[in-house]
Amino acid sequence: MKRNLKEWKEKRAEFLKGKTCSWCGTSDSLCIHTPRAFSPAQISSEIYSAAYVRFKEVYRQKYQKFDHIQTGKHRHKSHPAWHKASTVHKIEPDQADLEEQYVEALVEDSGEGNFKKLYHDWLEEAGIKELIDEEVKKAEEECQSLTNAIALCKRCHFASLRGMELCPVCRNKYKSLRYDTCFDCLPEEKRDEVLARQKKKGDFPENSGQIS
């Protein structure tokens, strides 16, 4: 449904009626937001990512051969870290628990140079593209019906488009999804660590990861 149509405008007004921003609680400048996890593009990306991981294992099993070579290291239940066989232990380990360490060395790759073609052929054979089309269509229908939609103010909506969310501690500033809090809400020791690390890179968190 095009968003300049009268039908959409009426649907939008009805959805937002009586609502407040799901993040910050304001009732000003609300808009409809579909979380990224439910967007057609994200769903397609996640399926492709999972399929790629699966195909790498299929390719490995079907087209590659490996030799297993000892590294000269082993470990025991009493000494779980890998260590050289010549290591002298303070407490004599139980040799019955001995586990040798091996590394894999590729010795044959019969599909070499054809990975991309084989991958796309496998996507067709495994029905992955059909699955993606089905899931994307379903996601598009849910977007149109506002099944997973929430109300966000324009400020929070803008932050979400940048891959950020409201800090759960101060409920005022925004943070990257990979962090637990915004920079100002970090414990002092953690802030000092971040600042020291960023100074080495010539960047500062207060200038690079927040929206006031």
Image: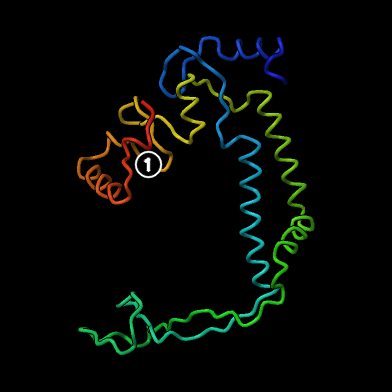
Residue ID for mark 1: 179
The answer to whether residue 167 is left or right of residue 27 is left
Classed neighbour count for the residue bearing mark 1: other residues with Cα under 10 Å, few (<14), some (14–19), many (≥20): few
Residue type, label 1: Tyr
Residue at 66% of width from left, 36% of height from top?
40
Residue at 31% of width from left, 31% of height from top?
169
Front residue of this view, candidates 191 and 141:
191
Front residue of this view, candidates 188 and 68:
188
Which percent across, then down, holds residue 195?
26, 44
Task: From this view, report whether residue 117 is shown above or below residue 43.
Answer: below
Which percent across, then down, holds residue 48?
65, 50
Which percent across, then down, holds residue 153?
48, 19
Kind of element beneath mark 1: loop
Residue at 71% of width from left, 35% of height from top?
138
The answer to whether residue 51 is left or right of residue 27 is right
The residue sitting at the bottom extreme is 86
Which percent across, then down, holds residue 135?
70, 40
The residue sitting at the front extreme is 202
